Image (spheres, rainbow, N blue to C red):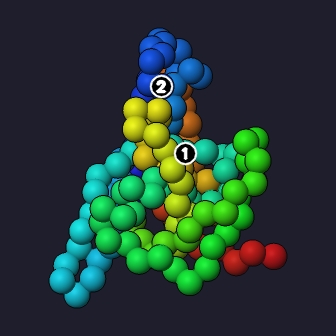
Amino acid sequence: MKIPVHYVDRPGFTSEYLSEKSPVVEVQIGYVSQAGPKLKTVRALIDTGADDIFVDESVLIECGCPVASDRTSVRSAHGTKDHAVYEAFINFPAAQLGLRTQVISSDYAPGERSYQAVFGTRFLELGVLVIDPNGESYFTVGPQKDKP
């Protein structure tokens, strides 16, 4: 199952070079309850330097995602900050794949980024990322391997 990776310009900055664009996947993020799903289509940055899955908190609130019982501290170049952890459902329409997981909230200012989520290594461990600037870039979800 291939999930296409697209390259998008950063807000306020247009370039013809892929190295200056953001690699993103289109996903649906939200919550699925007995009343049915409430999902929002968003772009998620593929970030090999991030450890976890981060989602704009306004998306999580809009979709009714419940807050998990714990918070987590996230360290970045901007310092350390506590973030709420939410229960969420991530749907990959291109791969007909859904995933229930916990995500860490982030607060992205509107128009500041070309994406509303960041998928780090916790996501990348689910498969294989292929970045081919001259061809097709994609993420494949594969069978899970046992860790040594």
Mark 2, Cα crowd under 10 Å, few <14 / some 14-19 / many 20+, is: some
Q: Are marks 2 and 1 in contact (CB under 8 Å)?
A: no
Read off the residue under disc 2: 10
Q: Residue at x 44, y 24 (%)?
A: 11
Of the two numbered discs 2 and 1 in the rendering, the one whose residue sits closer to the viewer:
2
Residue 95 image point, x, y percent: 34, 59
Compare marks 2 and 1 and give the one earlier in the sequence.
2
Q: Secondary structure at mark 2?
A: loop
Read off the residue under disc 1: 46
> In the rendered image, is residue 148 in sight?
yes
How many numbered tags mark residues here?
Answer: 2
Q: Residue at x 32, y 58 (%)?
A: 28
> In the rendered image, is residue 7 in sight?
no
Which one is in front, 12 or 110?
Answer: 110
> What is the residue that sits farthest to the right in this orientation?
148
Work out which quarter of the rendered image holds the C terminus and state it.
bottom right
78 left or right, relative to 27: right
> What is the residue that sits farthest to the left in this orientation?
35
**Amino acid at pointer 1:** Ile
**Residue 105 position (above or below residue 85):** above
Work out which quarter of the rendered image holds the N terminus and state it.
bottom left
Q: Secondary structure at mark 1?
A: strand
Which one is in front, 18 or 73?
Answer: 73
Which quadrant of the figure has residue 53? bottom right
Marks 2 and 1 sit apart, C-alpha to C-alpha, by 14 Å
Residue 97 image point, x, y percent: 36, 67
Residue 142 image point, x, y percent: 52, 65
**Amino acid at pointer 2:** Arg
Mark 1, Cα crowd under 10 Å, few <14 / some 14-19 / many 20+, is: many
